[in-house]
Image (cartoon, rainbow, N blue to C red):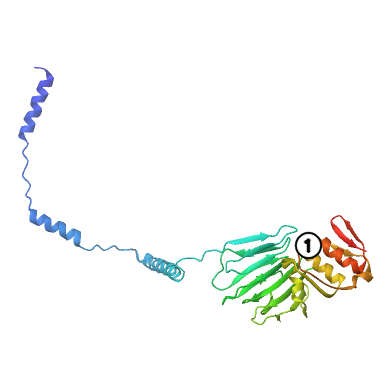
Amino acid sequence: MDNNEIEDNDCYGLIGRIHFKPVLYDKKENYERLKERISGSRKILFPERNIRSWKYFAVAVSFALFVVSVMHFVDPKPRNELVWYETTAVPDAKTKIVLPDSSVVWINANACLRYPRSFDDDQRKVNVSGEAFFEVRKDKKPFIVQLEDFYIKVLGTSFNVITEEQSDKTIITLLEGRIALFRNDNKTDMPDKLMMPNQQAVCYGSMRDIVVSTVKPETVTSWITGVFRFEGSTLEEITGELQQAFHVKIHIENEIMRQKTFTAVFEDKETLDEILSILRISARYSIERRQGEIYIK
């Protein structure tokens, strides 16, 4: 017998001497103990110096949740930002635009109109530079035309606007209805000027005064209609209207000819050359073109 077999026999002998005492186990008693541990409350003690800071933290969290809840209740869906369009008329042309409220705007050459895709609940607001003619549809919401130094407020009317950036000059002519002019720094409900039909307001951004006079309304719509009516108009007044309609600079080099008056009606959409040629029959002036501009001598 080798040594390994002797060692195995000794191990078996020792194991045979070991006897395990049965463990007494009461199922009902152990079940009650487990149930008591699960259902019983457990108190957690904090150090005295930390109790106050925990109170402040709990109050802060509760207040933050309250503020968020109030904001969500007051404005659950933030208002969408307006989407704006910008339209600029190409040189030597005019453009017609129908606004979201069905109002119609004509913008002359190089003029620019900025308007939203849809008007908000409070007002109908647009921005314009250059010359534009408005036919505003009546609505309970006011229609606002924002200019450089002031704005025009209307409910329903038709009027013409000209803004000249180089001279800082603005000309507003009212055809129908009533409009109110407000300077941008006017924070009251009292307008700086109220206009009636057939009135024209002229103002400069650097000056506070707004000069209002009576005019013939058809003279400001000829660039849209193509109809020109001159009744005792001076050649200087006529060429000013023709410049706006045909987008060309006209110079009068003869001072006497500048004040000569004409009475004529052009209703067949005559061209600029045709109008000047017909007027020349009685005035006997000469016409010269240089670099795209017209000179009357």
Most extreme residue toward the top is: 1
Look at the picture and state if 195 lies above or below 48.
below
Return the residue at label 1: 246
- Horizontal side of 48 relative to 190 (left or right) equals left
Q: Nearer the viewer, residue 74 or 268?
A: 268
Location of the N terminus (image quadrant) = top left
**In percent of the image, x 10 and y 21: which residue is there?**
5
Q: Quadrant of residue 279?
A: bottom right
- Horizontal side of 268 relative to 81 (left or right) equals right
Q: Nearer the viewer, residue 278 or 97?
A: 278
Q: Quadrant of residue 288?
A: bottom right
Q: Quadrant of residue 290?
A: bottom right
**In percent of the image, x 36 and y 67: which residue is there?**
51
Q: Nearer the viewer, residue 9 or 93?
A: 93
Q: Nearer the viewer, residue 166 or 176?
A: 176
**In percent of the image, x 61 and y 61: which residue is there?**
85
Instruction: Report the amino acid beneath label 1.
Output: Phe
